[in-house]
Amino acid sequence: MNRHPKIILPFYFGHTGLPLGHSCADGFRQLGWDVHCVNNHEASFFYRYVFKGLNKLLKAIGLPQISAAGKSWSWVPLNYRRAQLEKAVEAVRPDVILIFNPFPSVYGTEFLLGLKKICPTKLVGWNVDGPYDDLIAHSKADARVFDKYFCIHRYGYSGADKIQYLPAYALDSKRYFKLSTNTSPKRRIVFVGAYSPRREEFLSAIADLPLEIYGTSWRKRGSNATKRCVRANRIWGNALLKLMNESSIVLNISSWDPKRTGLSLRVVDIPATGAFMLTDETPELIDIFGNQISVPTFKDPADLRRQVMHFLDADEERHALANQMYERILRSDTYADRMRTIVNEITIESPSDL
């Protein structure tokens, strides 16, 4: 009897964070797979409501806090997440397990190989983080453990490392789309993303303009100039769509040097809403937009300021460029296309049963 192939996706599946896991799950479902999602950011009840509360109390009265790192207690986050994934594998007996950012600190090599003893599953890894030197070293080591290993950038490895390039950006029309509105965009510049030193350098150059920042760690690590621009620690869902649709300029600034390759999800997400995107200059944009569309870019902080000053008042030009990017993005690869690339690279046991 034929059956659908089964896959387990351990990733963040909360409602207030990056929806990449949901996008990939939808892509596999469109290909006819049975998808089982495991929230690997979930913590045990004891850790959330007892242990963390106890540490807050100890901190408040000036006593040393208790560290759970490296402990064998079942409620410690790493042990709890391992147990949740192991239970899922025992119950589902998947054909494939796709691990995002599969570094040893997440699950551990011995644990991952132990999952294969439960059932003859394929282990697929996908590094969806940037081209940072320490992470590249991890990727090279991890690629030897997985049956297939993918990376969103081309920097720092070769074919001999058994790593294949697979970008994470793709069209998710279920979550990013143009809202029906007749109102003109507000005269503001918006950036949505976590703090990084590189982003601080660029945004500091326009902090005196109508800039709004939405993202984690800015209030803790940002300069006084950028802190004044922070509006919220996070924004997702309909609120994010509304923000993009009602803003003059939506910025995409990579945490890493784009010369190292690797594009963030925002290069598709922003134009998919119909918003005007101003982004880092990188040759990889041609992979998305081709030669026919002139995507507005900047090279350095001073250039960012020049471009922002120009486009804030260039309403017709800005609107025309936003429409061109929007129309092109509607024809770009979807997450079903991305997941098909993974499927085509793996061989599942007993293919006649699928």
Image (cartoon, helix red, strand yellow):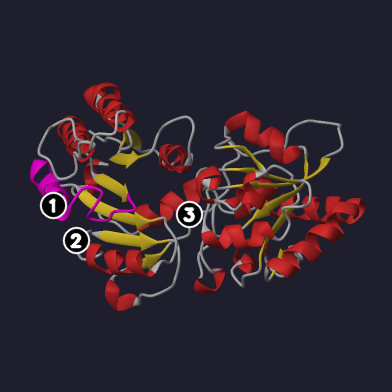
Q: Which mark is residue 74?
A: none
Indicate left or right for 78 with 285 as reference.
Answer: left
Q: CA distance from mark 1 to mark 2?
A: 8 Å
Mark 1, secondary structure of its residue: helix
Which amino acid type is marked by label 2? Val
Q: Quadrant of residue 148?
A: bottom left
Above or below, 336 relative to 149 = above
Above or below, 312 relative to 118 = below
Q: Nearer the viewer, residue 29 or 177?
A: 177
Tell me which label, 3 or 2, sits earlier in the chain: 2
Q: CA distance from mark 3 to mark 2?
A: 21 Å
Q: Nearer the viewer, residue 65 or 306?
A: 65
Q: Which mark is residue 168?
A: 3
Q: Quadrant of residue 321?
A: bottom right
Indicate left or right for 272 with 4 as reference.
Answer: right
Which amino acid type is marked by label 1? Leu
How many circles with numbers are drawn on the protein?
3
Q: Which residue is pictured at 42% across the width and 57% down the height?
A: 129
Residue 106, image x, y percentages: 25, 48
Q: CA distance from mark 1 to mark 3?
A: 25 Å
Residue stretch in magenta = 100-119
Look at the image and tell me whether residue 330 can be seen. Answer: no
Quadrant assignment for the N terminus: top left
Which amino acid type is marked by label 3? Ala
Residue 20, image x, y percentages: 46, 43
Q: Which residue is labeled 2 in the image? A: 145
Mark 3, secondary structure of its residue: loop
Q: Which residue is labeled 1 in the image? A: 113
Indicate left or right for 145 with 223 as reference.
Answer: left
